[in-house]
Amino acid sequence: MSTELLAKMTTLRPFTCDDLFKFNNINLDPLTETYGIPFYLQYLAHWPEYFIVAEAPGGELMGYIMGKAEGSVAREEWHGHVTALSVAPEFRRLGLAAKLMEMLEEISERKGGFFVDLFVRVSNQVAVNMYKRLGYSVYRTVIEYYSASNGEPDEDAYDMRKALSRDTEKKSIIPLPHPVRPEDIE
């Protein structure tokens, strides 16, 4: 099957509890942050509309996005947040990540968000460049956001943002002039 045909035949649907038993092919990627089952279930219970899976015609999971709505409306910080986005290696370069991001952005628009944000490893230039192509910009650097597992130093993250239509003046994406620490993030 051609990659173009496969992309057209992909189903984007809500993530279900059963998918927890089928997404190891996606989560085994070293750049994918993985969490315990209770964490995924918490997102599924609280923000089910933000948890979307891409499924191949044969039922194999190709990728997923998991996010939430958070922040303060009064301070114009109500937004959609991308907690995890991952596509299995064999299904990359089909535009699935862009489609999943677009769905999360549309949900955030409907919920009245001012922006969508996400955190990405500074070293993950493939992802950083993809997010930039999707209209995201670096809002700030978060020092030592990602914990290292093998004696390596902790890694910094970029907090990347994309303004939504409610932020008419694009205030939410004005970059901070200095880095912050994880404990400084609200």
Image: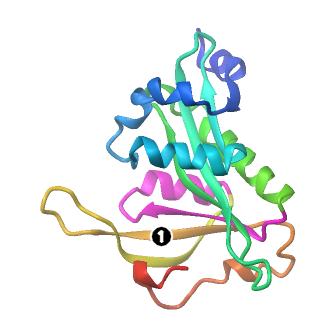
Q: Residue at x 86, y 71 (%)?
A: 166
Say which quadrant the C terminus sits in. bottom right
Please tell me how crowded label 1 is: few (under 14), some (14-19), or many (20+) other residues with Cα within 10 Å: many
- Magenta region includes residue 117: yes
Image location (x, y in percent) of residue 141: 45, 77
Q: Is residue 13 above or below residue 32?
A: above
Chain part drawn in magenta: 112-134
Q: Quadrant of residue 148?
A: bottom left
Image location (x, y in percent) of residue 84: 52, 50
Q: Is residue 119 above or below residue 45?
A: below
Q: Residue at x 84, y 65 (%)?
A: 112
- Magenta region includes residue 22: no
Query: 125 and 173: which one is in front?
Result: 173
Q: Is residue 165 left or right of residue 23?
A: right
Report whether residue 14 is seen: yes
Image location (x, y in percent) of residue 104: 71, 49
Callout 1 secondary element = strand
Report whether residue 95 is seen: no
Q: Is residue 14 above or below residue 75?
A: above
Identify the colour scheme used: rainbow
Query: Mark 1: which amino acid?
Result: Tyr
Mark 1 lies on residue:
158
Q: Residue at x 26, y 69 (%)?
A: 154
